[in-house]
Each structure stands twice: as structure tokens, then as C-alpha cells.
Image (cartoon, rainbow, N blue to C red):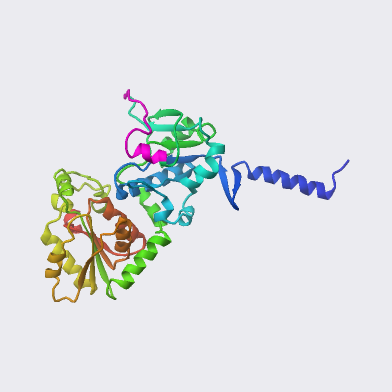
Amino acid sequence: MRPDHASVILLLSYFFSLLNQVFTSEVESNGSSFKWDTRGYVFYCPCMGRFGNQAEHFLGAIAFAKALDRTLILPPWRTYKNVPFSDFFQVEPLQSYHRVILAEDFMKHLASTYWPKGKRRGYCWLPPSSKAKCVMKEGNPFKPFWDGLEVDFDEKIVYHLGVHVWDPYERDQWQREFPPSSHPVLAFRGAPASYPVEEQNRHAHAFLKWSDKINHEVDEYIQNTLPKGPFVGIHLRNGIDWKNACEHAPGMPQYMASPQCLGYTRYRTVTKDLCFPPKQDILNRTEQAVRTYGARAVFVATDNDPMIDHLNFRLKGLDVKVFHLNPSLPQIDLAILGRADFFIGNCVSSFSSFVKRERDFSGKPSSFWAFDENQHQ
């Protein structure tokens, strides 16, 4: 008996429905759908340093997930508590770069079905000769981070592979050793990324867009506090902890975020002034920027001394005011610096490097303390 036309349509519809589920399985919840990606996931704890360091690791982690064609589970930012990724950044723009899902959504809507308790593995990198064990939740911030997401690990796996998965050989090693069919969620103890961010991964920052909440606070501050007209944004690292850290910088070909000004390939060494700029250099460059851009304000972001009195004295007679906010969220400082007409930052600081990358991708000019391009060729 030949099937009638309607039966053929039904059979074809069923076939295409099954085909569509080859890569995804869908869970409905409160009118929203969350699809399980059989190509696998990358999950990690952003447990190294403060926000600037975490942001550099994030860029490497999303590039890692993209290279392996796995969905990145967007982890909360780690302060003294877990802060949902979406509190600081919009999720939708990142979808234009690669597949992502908020950790909170993953745990609520997918984990219990597809990554259930009893089958959760943690992955730690250790040198091949190391006899240490993989410890996923020992100490702070590791334990409170995973506890905040209600994740315990039933098995720990040690791996020795690198994270440079833009290299076809290294990428193939990952896919052979940890296929998503048997390792659906690669939950790493730390970010599968290098620090500082690798040059080829910087471009992912173009898809990091501040959340509406952050943008609203910044809009209000700029409109209601700063005088109308151009403003210069500066970032100062001048605390005793930073001064001590800079004692180790001179002569190093790379130190913390220094590749942002010294480059990744040419051999240039870090100087003490580049890391801990002299007060006179800060005053000179700020005045020069104010004059060049006709600035009406200077916005100072710092975790220590904003040098308000010194700057006001130096800029006296230029019809410019100096502002320092010291917000509870340092992300507000970052977002304001991103809006400045000109920015001067610290070459070695990952806080400054966040601002520099954002401004690079929006076409805004920036420079660094104690740095002259011609002298560092």
C-alpha cells in the first residue's frame, strides 16, 4: 500500500524533528527553552586574582571553548561572593561570537538531567611528573565558588594537555582524549587560558558589552556629575602592594599585562617607571592630554591615592576639574574610563588592559604612563 500525501508529510516532519535533536535536546521552563548541546560544554572557576585578571582569563576561556566547538558556561565573577556574569555584561552580544549559557541557567535547567549528581567530573592540569592529586574545592575561592552553584565533584581527572587549541595538533589531542560523548562537561579547576591574554584572543573583548545596570549608573554619573565637554580618564596604581610588586619588574621581557604596550613578539623589557610611574610623569602626561583634548574634567580611577591635590595644583588655570568616585563596584570605574575622550593607564596592570582593549575596539585613543613608542621599538 502506497502512503498517502499526508502520511509522507508526517513522516518527513518526524524525520527532521529527530535530525534537529542530533545536536540539541530541549528543556522547557517557564516559557523559556534551554537546549542541551551534545557538542559539549566548558565550565571553570575564575579563581585567579581580581576582576582584571579574571577578565583576561575569560577571553582565553571563550576562545578555548570556541576552538573545541563546546558551549561556554558563563561562570559568575568572583569577588567576596559569586556575582552572576549578567550583572556586569550582556549575554546576547557574546552569542554573536560563540555559544554561551549562564551558569545559573545551566545548573537550574540542564544540569540535573544531563550532568546529574553522581556523574560530575572535575579537571585539573598538573605537570606530567607531578604526584599531586586533583583538588577542585579546597580553599578560597574554589570551595565557595562551586558551593555557590551547588556543585560537588564525584570524580577528578588530571590532564597534561595545553590550552593553545588554536593549534590543530593540540586541538586534536583534546578532541581525542576528551570527546563530548564521554566527557560532556569539562569543568576546570581554573580557567583553561593563559595569563596575560594571548594576542589572538584579544578580539573576543569586542563582544563584551556592559549590562544595562552598569550603563545606567555610568550615564547618570557622567551626565549629572562631570561638567559638559571632553574628559580625560586616568588609572593609577600607586599602593604599597603595587610598589612592592614593581620591584620585580625591571628587565623582565614580560610582566603581568605588559604585552599590551610592549607587544607580544618584539623583545622589549619592562622598566620600573613603566610599572610604577613617577609622580612627575603622571602630572606631565595628564596636563598634556587635558590641553590636547580641551578637557573640562579629569576622572581618576585608583585603589589607593587619587592625587587630587597634586592634579588640581598642576591643572590650575586650565578650567578643568578633577573627579574621583571610588565606587563600590570597580566595574563602574572601568566603564567610565571606557567613555573618556582620552585614557592613560598603567602598562603592567590588567585593570588598565581591560580599558585599553575596550577602547581599541571602539576606536578611542589611549596611552600609558612612562611609555613612549619610539623609545620602546
Give the image quarter of residue 314. Answer: bottom left
**Up-down relation of residue 186 to residue 13 (above or below):** above
Q: Quadrant of residue 313?
A: bottom left
User: Which residue is painted at 66% across and 43% down in the image?
Assistant: 19
Which residue is located at x 11 percent, y 61 percent?
280
Q: Characterize the magenta stretch by its predominant secondary structure.
A: loop
Task: Please say whether residue 164 is visible from this viewpoint.
Answer: no
Q: Would residue 194 appear left or right of 151 to someone viewing this image?
A: left
Is residue 249 found left or right of 167 in the rendered image?
A: left
Please identify the quadrant where the C terminus is shown.
bottom left
360 displayed left or right of 21: left
Q: Nearer the viewer, residue 204 or 313?
A: 313
Considering the image in quadrants, where does the N terminus appear? top right
Q: Position of residue 362 (x, y in %)?
A: 36, 63
Instruction: Say whether residue 263 is left or right of residue 183.
Output: left
Can residue 332 be seen at all in this image of the molecule? yes
Q: Is residue 303 above or below residue 12?
A: below
Assess whether residue 321 is covered by the magenta stretch: no
**x, y (%) of residue 186?**
45, 36
Residue 354, percent across and down?
31, 54
The span shown in magenta is 129-147
Q: Position of residue 286 (x, y in %)?
A: 18, 66
| Figure label count | 0
Quadrant of residue 89 within the rendered picture? bottom left
In this view, the residue farthest toward the right is 1
Residue 136 covered by magenta stretch: yes
> From what the image shows, is residue 280 above or below residue 45?
below
